[in-house]
Amino acid sequence: MYSVIVRDHVMIAHSFTGEVFGPAQRLHGATYVVDVEFKRPALDADGIVVDIGRAGDTLKRVLADFNYRNLDDLPAFKGRNTTTEFLARVIFDALVSAIGAGDLGPGAGAVEQIRVTLHESHVASASYDGRVSTS
Amino acid sequence: MYSVIVRDHVMIAHSFTGEVFGPAQRLHGATYVVDVEFKRPALDADGIVVDIGRAGDTLKRVLADFNYRNLDDLPAFKGRNTTTEFLARVIFDALVSAIGAGDLGPGAGAVEQIRVTLHESHVASASYDGRVSTS
Amino acid sequence: MYSVIVRDHVMIAHSFTGEVFGPAQRLHGATYVVDVEFKRPALDADGIVVDIGRAGDTLKRVLADFNYRNLDDLPAFKGRNTTTEFLARVIFDALVSAIGAGDLGPGAGAVEQIRVTLHESHVASASYDGRVSTS
Amino acid sequence: MYSVIVRDHVMIAHSFTGEVFGPAQRLHGATYVVDVEFKRPALDADGIVVDIGRAGDTLKRVLADFNYRNLDDLPAFKGRNTTTEFLARVIFDALVSAIGAGDLGPGAGAVEQIRVTLHESHVASASYDGRVSTS
Amino acid sequence: MYSVIVRDHVMIAHSFTGEVFGPAQRLHGATYVVDVEFKRPALDADGIVVDIGRAGDTLKRVLADFNYRNLDDLPAFKGRNTTTEFLARVIFDALVSAIGAGDLGPGAGAVEQIRVTLHESHVASASYDGRVSTS
Amino acid sequence: MYSVIVRDHVMIAHSFTGEVFGPAQRLHGATYVVDVEFKRPALDADGIVVDIGRAGDTLKRVLADFNYRNLDDLPAFKGRNTTTEFLARVIFDALVSAIGAGDLGPGAGAVEQIRVTLHESHVASASYDGRVSTS
């Protein structure tokens, strides 16, 4: 399996609901350094997995919806804890949609799997790894 | 698949038996920067894989058994080479036991897989990745 | 000159005032990975710059005042932009006070300089580097 | 599954053919920091996956074929785009051959899978992950 | 002293003249991950060293002159070895010019010192650290 | 001021004397990832600070005296705590001697300052930064 990984970051505020979160129930924030890995079993005719420039641009556009935001204010996240692992899935879903819409080019339809990892500090990160089903 | 990764470290002395180890047959030591990845297919009701605070505390407790020790002196490792890959498995087993004992909370029973990686320098690391079977 | 560097992190929310900040004028947040470097010209009788355990504990205590907080709500920061470079200075001042109060042990009085660096992402950081004057 | 990961690097020049590459169609270059992960289900009698010294030496020898070269001049790559993901596969194939030739020792025949990752910058990398079939 | 550090990268080809360079006398290439540190003794009225957005944009513009280029072909470098330390100075000079031209905003005139570091691999880097004299 | 930085590592065992060290009074060990920065005000005729190959070789030779050793057994360290900051100075002194002996080439005599940093984990490091006086 081949893969290409691109990195960007996003800076957000949010709070959590539930005793398990302790002080993180208060309004606080995070920088998430985001790694996205695109996987496919064979390279295209140009010898690539995806156009790395387009991959980076698409990731930046996806993150722009959250960047410099208080996630508690976004209707899409109403009643949800926007944990690191939850956000990894949100970004995964947005990238699958972007591939479906052709944003990564026609060849990106061959991408079979995507892994999204969010590093929230030098000691903690979370990820979502799933199959791309664009049908 | 979702995952959460926490990091800590441990500083130990040890020696190896076997010509393949060359100068590492002498008593020496290592800092292992330890990454533990907990994986499960779905998030719990709070939107998490495991309580990241409890995960970190549990890892620290597991590492405390070896920290600032000469592993050659520990009865548990009698007659074994405490290589980086061997220690990754030892930590894996201890974490599976901790989950079974409820140390990571009741929800942690849904964790299906754990990957333990020990970075021994900027150019070498080793890991053990296995399924959690608590039955 | 000798130095010892310890690392910890803090997760906060805040907003900025001023057109120069663009979208960062909105309420957002950051993880700051904080490196503190303590410098002195000679080692003490134990062969250390500062007790690294105490240094780490003191840094954690200093960061606890801001951790999981919305900095816009803290009276101490009223009317100030809590930029990365500004916060580096705030942490510097708190560490100088801690040394003066003996929190790092009597030997820490020999520390002449402290550099505080806050990494806000994989592509940006800021620091304050100053002399310790405890007189 | 156990694994051991070793790191080295290589510095090359090359150019790409195809509009998708934009300015990278010009002759330019890259440092690739290369991580190779060797995986096998059980440790050998010494408690290791592979002899980490031999693994590092073998990787260095494999990279020496490309190091400080203009890849456009190498007959082996005639008519191919030497993208990061393509080179990951080239290195994978060379390592499988090396195992077959006994370069990593007789025990290395138990290695079932190899993952080769090339980091081309702090924001982009690519990899090839495949099964070792030495039959 | 306050500082702000921004990071970007550039991918180039080049060759060196002189026996000391060994195999690096051949045409090869490098990725340079570039850190630029801007230093000034006091923050401006907004609480910043420089506008971090403008700093990043200026660095990207400076690097664009070399990015995806064979440095051997650039008239500006005729007869010079474009070593990592030499390039650190070239980027330093371009940033001083940019400050003089007002590209980083009027407040950037207070920047007293700039340090440019180029990481050429995980084991080697070089830098130039100098005073800004815009008179 | 120009500088070049090279990295290597060393794995040792040792113990400390003194209550301040707590559990580190027991025999334990460490991996030190070692960065050495060579500084001089002007480049030589080849456009370099030092021959980076020779610098790396010299560092490796200096570290070989300690590598895979129990520092408690080395006569040179009798009655001393081999703390991270102490070892930074030991390596500094060995490098100054090496320059004096011509190991880094005749041009290395122009090196004015050396900074040695030892990273003992992902959260702690120490360094010694001093002037080179070869007279």
Image: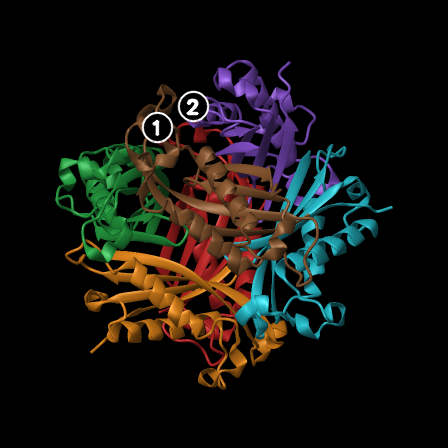
Chain colours: A cyan, B brown, C orange, D purple, E red, F green
Pointer 1 local density, CA inside 10 Å: few below 14, some 14–19, many at least 20 = many
Q: Nearer the viewer, residue A110 or F30?
A: F30
User: Amino acid under label 2?
Assistant: Asp
Quadrant of the frame with the C terminus of chain B: top right
Residue A31 position in % (x across, y down): 56, 63
Name the residue located 46 percent from the left edge and 71 percent from the top edge: E108
- In the rendered structure, the answer to whether residue A127 lies left or right of residue C128 reads right
- In the rendered structure, the answer to whether residue D95 lies left or right of residue B82 reads right
- The quadrant in which residue A107 appears is top right
Residue at the disc numbered 2:
D46
Tag 2, which chain?
D
The residue tagged with tag 1: helix, strand or loop? loop
Residue C48 visible in the current orientation = yes
Residue E90 visible in the current orientation = no
Q: Nearer the viewer, residue D50 or D33?
A: D50
The residue tagged with tag 2: helix, strand or loop? loop
Q: Nearer the viewer, residue B72 or F48?
A: B72
Tag 1, which chain?
B
- In the rendered structure, the answer to whether residue E107 lies left or right of residue F97 reads right
Residue A78 position in % (x across, y down): 74, 71
Say yes or no: labels 2 and 1 on the same chain: no
Q: How many marks?
A: 2
C68 over E30 or under it: above or below: below
User: Amino acid under label 1?
Assistant: Phe
Q: Are the residues flagged by discs 2 and 1 in contact, CB closer than 8 Å?
A: yes
Residue at the disc numbered 1:
B16
Residue D32 position in % (x across, y down): 53, 37
Residue C75 position in % (x across, y down): 47, 86
Name the residue located 69 percent from the left edge and 33 percent from the top edge: A1
- Disc 2 to disc 1, how far (Cα)? 9 Å
